[in-house]
Image (tube, rainbow, N blue to C red):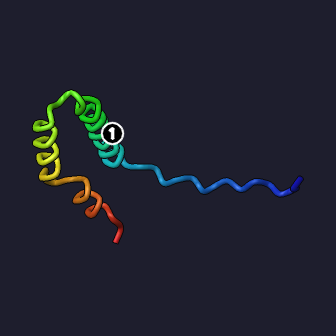
Amino acid sequence: MSNTVPTTPPPATPLSGEAIRLMNYVDDVSTTLRRVLALAPTLTVDERKRLSDYLKNSSPNADTVMEALRVK
């Protein structure tokens, strides 16, 4: 058994209200995508293809947002 005192990480910098609001938007998008996943099996093959194309061509998409958020 060690006699060292466990170190605690430094407290995180508090988030601004705007950052919290944006994180809530991300939660909303995740909820929407879960709904799409839950209902996708009910669609015909053609409907799934059209929805897939629609999602792929949406702009901005998640990759665009991730690139904008990447720390330079």
Secondary structure beneath label 1 = helix
Mark 1 burial class by Cα count in 10 Å: few <14, some 14-19, many 20+? few
Is residue 53 shown left or right of residue 38?
Answer: left
The residue depicted at 22 percent of the width and 59 percent of the height is 64
Is 39 drawn above or below residue 60 in the view shown? above
Q: Nearer the viewer, residue 60 or 45?
A: 45
- Relative side of 11 to 66, left or right: right
Please state the total of marks drawn on the protein image: 1
Residue 4 pos. (x, y %): 83, 57
Q: Residue 47 location, x and y as percent?
A: 11, 36
Quadrant of the image containing the C terminus: bottom left
The quadrant in which residue 27 appears is top left
Residue 44, compared with residue 2, is above or below; it is: above
Q: Measured along the vertical axis of the image, is residue 63 above or below residue 51?
A: below
Q: Nearer the viewer, residue 3 or 14?
A: 3
- Residue 30: horizontal and vertical position, in percent? 31, 39
Query: Which amino acid, mark 1?
Result: Asp
Q: Residue at x 52, y 53 (%)?
A: 12
Q: Residue at x 25, y 58 (%)?
A: 63
Q: Is residue 13 left or right of residue 27?
A: right
Q: Quadrant of residue 50?
A: top left
Position in image of residue 34 (x %, y %): 30, 35
Q: Which residue is mark 1?
A: 27
